[in-house]
Structures are given as structure tokens and as C-alpha cells.
Amino acid sequence: MKGETVTVLRRIQSGVDEGNNPVYEWERKTVENVLVDSPNTANADDSTRPDGMTVDAVFRFPRDYAGGPLDGCRIIIRGDEAHPYCVVGHPIPLDGGMKPTAWNMSVEATYSEG
């Protein structure tokens, strides 16, 4: 099994404006061998999602991912810049020495327009 290449967009502060307000830009990182999966079919109102957050995609990141936390990041798949997915929560890699596959972190993401 082989994943695909995705682009992770991370919002970073690049300076301040004349009113001393932070100015941000998007840093781009390419990550190879990411599995792109559909979410499970659980309803957004079930007990595991009390705030009603729906998940539109699940990205399984490879063990060798070293790009830092994905909180607040966006993920672009298949070059579709106009439709990035927004990472939900604070994904963490599985630990404990088990290495049955090349992927150890599930990243849930949502998509919305407007």
C-alpha cells in the first residue's frame, strides 16, 4: 500500500502591521505517503462528538512525519488549492513501539465552503 502526496498549510506570524496587529501567512510543506480515507459514518450528534463536529476526511500520516503539530493546519489533496481541509483537534501519533504499518497518526479534517 502506498499513500499520496499532500500539502500541509501552517499559519505563521510573519510580522506586524502599522497598528501593531499580527500579520500571518501560510507556510507550505509537502508530505509524502499519506493515506486519504473517508470518515466513518457516525452521525455528528452521537455521543463521541458532543459538539456536533463532522469529519469529512481522515488522513493517515506516515511514521516518518516530522513536520510538527497539525493543530489549525489545512491540508490540500490532489492539488485542489481551492478546497483545503481543516484539521480538527490536536492529532497525536500512536506510540508504544508497535509498528504493524508505515502510518501511525490519524488526522481528522473537515471541509466547508463559504
Image (cartoon, helix red, strand yellow):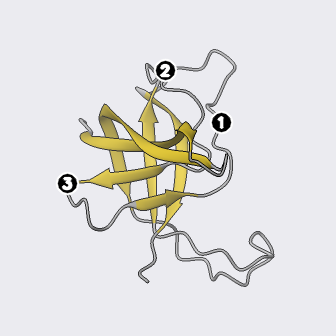
Q: Where residue 99 sits: x, y (%)? A: 52, 20
Q: Where residue 34 sits: x, y (%)? A: 34, 39
Q: CA distance from mark 3 to mark 2?
A: 21 Å
Is there a contact, CB below 8 Å, between mark 3 and mark 2? no
Q: Where residue 35 sits: x, y (%)? A: 34, 44
The residue indicated by pointer 1 is 92
Indicate the amino acid at tag 3.
Answer: Arg
Indicate the amino acid at tag 1.
Answer: Ile
Please tell me how crowded label 3 is: few (under 14), some (14-19), or many (20+) other residues with Cα within 10 Å.
few
| Quarter of the image where the N terminus is located | top left
Of mark 3 and mark 2, the one earlier in the sequence is 2
Quarter where residue 47 is shown: bottom right
The residue indicated by pointer 2 is 66
Indicate the amino acid at tag 2.
Answer: Ala
Quarter where residue 9 is shown: top left
Please tell me how crowded label 2 is: few (under 14), some (14-19), or many (20+) other residues with Cα within 10 Å.
few
Of mark 3 and mark 1, the one earlier in the sequence is 3
Q: Is residue 36 above or below residue 111?
A: above
